[in-house]
Amino acid sequence: MIVEDDYDGEFRYEGQPLESLQGLDREGRVIYIGTFSRTVFSSLRIGYLITPRRLVPAFTAAKWLCDRHTATLDQETLAEFIASGMYERYLRRVRRRNAARREVLLEALHTHLRDRVDVTGDGAGAHVVLWPKHRISEDSVTASAAAQGVRVYGISGYFLRKSSRTGILLGYSRMKETAIREGIRRLGKVL
């Protein structure tokens, strides 16, 4: 089985949207996971699975054992939001807003960090990863950035094994454009 976690696939900014593995699956080997916590608001806590038909009873039983149900009012409200077409309109608005913030972030990175970092993950989602070209201590950078009023996160904790490669994770979707510019200016001094 392949588990496809598409937690922010709705936010792609360049090129054609990527087709999901689940959509390509003809043998019933992909379990597709998505969430509305990422697209609507984080405290909504409603996710979904698209599973091969033969696994539906097992997942239904597992859900029942874990927490019995998700709040009915939340589910019904979300269903109406989707059925009315308001969810799609909302997503288009958020995509435009995120794309504008992404552009500001990339501009600021180019201005203040230039060739000191490589940037990945900028084609989709709500965050990017900076890969410094020179060795850094993630802990030192995150602490120094925090002292400057900038919150960034190291990525080494996301590796299965200890990696010699270090990086910095930057989120931008909930920030104002002026704060993005100023934060990157400050981060540039730290790095």
Image: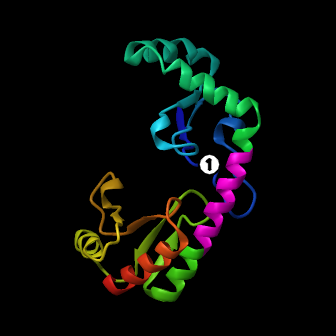
Q: Number of labelled discs?
A: 1
Up-down: is 132 above or below 48?
below
Relative placement, left or right, of 51 versus 96 is left
Which residue shows up at 47% across the image and 16% down it? 69
Residue occupying the point 63% across, 54% down:
11
Residue at 43% x, 16% y: name it.
62
Is 2 included in the stretch rendered in magenta? no
- Seen in the picture, residue 111 relative to 56 is either above or below; the reply is below
* SS state under label 1: loop
In percent of width and height, residue 103 lies at 62, 73
Q: What secondary structure is the stretch in magenta mostly built from?
A: helix
> Residue 96: horizontal and vertical position, in percent?
69, 61
- Which quadrant holds residue 169? bottom left
Residue occupied by mark 1: 9
Residue stretch in magenta: 89-103
Q: What residue type is labelled 1?
A: Gly
Q: Where is residue 4 in the image (x, y as percent from the top left)?
A: 55, 39
Q: Badge 1 local density, few (<14 within 10 Å), some, or many (20+)?
A: some
